[in-house]
Amino acid sequence: PWNQGFLMSGDIVRRMDPYFPFEKSVEQWGRSFAAMNISYKQATMDLDLLDRKGKYSNGFCHWPQPAWVKPGGTWQPSTTHFTSLADPSAIGSGYTGLTTLMHEAGHAAHFANIQMPSPLFAQERSPTSVAYAELQSMFLDSLVGDADWMAKYAISREGEAIPWDLVAEQIKATHPYKVFALRGMLAVPYFERALYEMPEEDVTAESIKALADKVEKDIQGGLSARPLLSVPHILSDEASCYYHGYVLAEMG
């Protein structure tokens, strides 16, 4: 019943864009984490930050080498690969690309600092808590939208800080609609639960699509601009039955 795209449209993104030049993203990440004494404990990191044709359309972080303490007491640092999806030519991409970078860098920092006598503790599957992992990364990516953070780090190429009135205008324009994003997150685990509870003989392409539409209408009030079946987590073995972690982290 609500045209969210229309209600949230405007020139705020365009006016904020000069204060989030993407070429400054790595510096903003490094300075922000350093100020909070977040380090990576000798980790090796491979960053892939720009969008391109054929690239997986969701930011992610994974660990070819988990961090752990070996039986002799020596430290094995992690090797981390993580991505973002910035398009420097697109208006607003600096902000969204930095947010994704801060999120995935938060995961990388979390798992780089786990000092346990087994590598099994420094990866995203059990016994790791999804909500615990996402709480840290979502807190860190939320800094990009924090007024204090923007006052210190949102600096244009000309060295000008973002004006306070623009920060206030952005908060007033977006804050009332954040509940819609939360409902969008809630829809994913509700859909997955209903799907996995569905009798096997009823599982067809048509019934799955109908179920996704029903969940969107029940929870989001109508069909979503981002259809449930386009959410990559649902189809990925390491990320299925995972999305509730984002909701719990947001509540945290």
Image: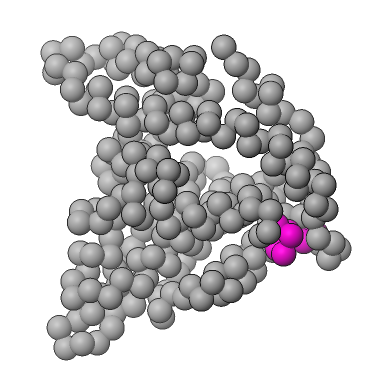
Q: Is residue 113 left or right of residue 49?
A: left
144 is higher (above) or lower (below) than 79: above
Quadrant assignment for the N terminus: top right
Q: Position of residue 110 (x, y in %)?
A: 39, 65
Quarter location, residue 248:
top left
Q: How many marks?
A: 0
Q: Residue at x 23, y 74 (%)?
A: 116
Start-end of magenta stretch = 150-156
Q: Position of residue 222 (x, y in %)?
A: 49, 14
Viewer-closest of 203 and 153: 153
Residue 9 is inside the magenta segment: no
Please say whether residue 237 is visible from this viewpoint.
yes
Q: Residue at x 28, y 46 (%)?
A: 238
Viewer-closest of 90 and 113: 113
Viewer-closest of 186 and 118: 186
Q: Position of residue 2 (x, y in %)?
A: 60, 16
Q: Residue at x 20, y 56 (%)?
A: 127
Colouring of the image: one colour
Q: Is residue 126 left or right of residue 226?
A: left
Q: Is residue 72 left or right of residue 114?
A: left
Q: Position of residue 211 (x, y in %)?
A: 32, 15
Please say whether residue 48 is visible from this viewpoint.
no
Q: Residue at x 42, y 43 (%)?
A: 251
Quarter location, residue 21:
bottom right
